């Protein structure tokens, strides 16, 4: 099942979609029992769970037809229209989720002028339940950072799939700020329609290692599995990306960047170490 796949990866953090942007990507606000069961399994293993709001509540998505409001449009409305949906998630889990992220890893809310107002509305509405929430906002490393850091503790930065491994740090560096407690990076897989699967996986692996080399607080990837429905149940199956990710985690573990040097005339070596070996 999903929990077993996550635990086998030996990761430390997981993002769960609480509100999503379209009905083709199910959100846990519409499946409270599944959320409860999943959290039980993850928390038993002491994983940090991050709740992600990327669109309107599922009830609003269903009622809106082909043109649902965006997350920022929802948060700009009278909070009485969405507070019940927020409370239904945060009230039972206020002290369980490690953090709450506005925008999923495909979005760039950090560059949107409406984001600060949405953040203020969100924080005001949940204040009674979470007086000091640990918030993150989605950003994109392919875009310029905002003129001033956002009033959140964490920046969730997505590195576009077309950024080459050697250029990852150059895209991350402009977004570093002492105003943020943590900088997170998400690394989406390459677009497989433009290259063979083996080449795409190799490229993704190199970008994952480059993200680790960037020495950020956390590195995230899209879930490397897919669902297959049978007549009686939903089967969750790992993809080839799962094997790549598990291998990188197994080799690097919690090792930190140590040194970088040229190897011959065409290669560059990035060494990771744990204080005792590299």
Image (cartoon, helix red, strand yellow):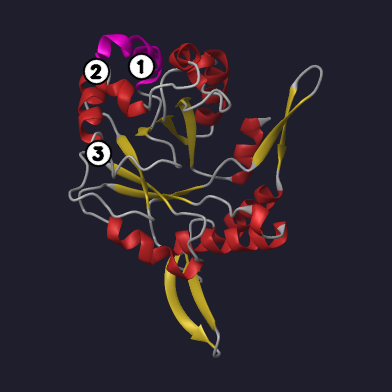
Q: Quick check: 173 left or right of 120?
A: right
Q: Residue at x 50, y 52 (%)?
A: 187
Q: Residue furthest bottom?
A: 265
Q: Which residue is mark 1?
A: 86
- Which residue is drawn at the image coordinates 53% and 45% (left, top)? 11
The residue carrying pointer 3 sits among few (fewer than 14), some (14 to 19) or many (20 or more) residues within 10 Å by Cα, namely some
Work out whether 205 lies above or below 93: below
What residue is pinned by disc 2? Answer: 125
Residue 93 inside the magenta-drawn segment: yes
Residue numbers of the magenta segment: 77-94
Please say if the residues under marks 2 and 1 sit with CB atoms less than 8 Å apart. Answer: yes
Q: Secondary structure at mark 2?
A: helix
In this picture, residue 26 sits left or right of residue 260: right
Is the residue marked by circle 1 packed among few (<14), some (14-19), or many (20+) residues within 10 Å? some
Residue nearest the observer in this picture, 149 or 7 = 149
Q: How many marks?
A: 3
User: In the rendered view, does 140 fall on the left or right side of 163?
Assistant: left
Estimate the x, y position of residue 236 in percent, counting from the top left: 71, 32
Per the model, the C-alpha gap separating discs 3 and 2 is: 16 Å
Q: Do labels 3 and 2 touch, CB within 8 Å?
A: no
Dot 1 lies on which element? Answer: helix
Give the CA separation, mark 1 to mark 3. Answer: 18 Å
Question: Which residue does the image show at 53% across and 58% down from the upper left?
Answer: 208
Percent x, y of residue 222: 55, 43
Of the numbered discs in the image, which one, if any, rests on residue 152?
Answer: 3
Outermost residue, right side: 231
Where's residue 265, x and y in %?
Answer: 54, 90
User: Looking at the image, which residue is at 50% across and 14% down?
Assistant: 62
């Amino acid at each position: 099942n999903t929990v077993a796949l996550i635990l086998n990866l030996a990761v430390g953090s997981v993002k769960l979609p609480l509100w999503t942007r379209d009905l083709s990507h199910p959100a846990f606000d519409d499946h409270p029992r599944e959320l409860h069961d999943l959290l039980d399994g993850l928390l038993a293993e002491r994983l940090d769970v991050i709740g992600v709001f990327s669109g309107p509540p599922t009830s609003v998505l269903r009622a809106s037809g082909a043109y649902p409001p965006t997350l920022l449009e929802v948060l700009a409305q009278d909070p009485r229209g969405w507070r019940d949906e927020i409370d239904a998630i945060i009230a039972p889990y206020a002290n369980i989720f490690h953090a709450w992220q506005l925008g999923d890893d495909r979005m760039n809310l950090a560059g949107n002028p409406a984001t600060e107002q949405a953040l203020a509305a969100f924080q005001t509405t949940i204040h009674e339940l979470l007086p000091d929430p640990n918030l993150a906002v989605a950003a994109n490393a392919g875009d310029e950072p905002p003129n001033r850091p956002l009033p959140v503790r964490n920046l969730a930065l997505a590195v576009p799939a077309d950024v080459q491994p050697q250029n990852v740090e150059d895209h991350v560096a402009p977004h570093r700020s002492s105003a943020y407690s943590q900088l997170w990076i998400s690394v989406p897989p390459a677009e497989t329609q433009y290259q063979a699967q083996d080449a795409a996986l190799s490229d993704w692996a190199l970008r994952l290692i480059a993200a680790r080399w960037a020495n950020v607080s956390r590195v995230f990837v899209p879930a490397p599995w897919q669902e297959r429905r049978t007549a009686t149940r939903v089967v969750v199956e790992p993809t080839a990306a799962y094997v790549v990710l598990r291998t990188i985690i197994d080799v690097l573990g919690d090792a930190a960047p140590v040194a970088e040097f040229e190897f011959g005339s065409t290669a560059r070596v990035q060494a990771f170490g744990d204080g005792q070996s590299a």
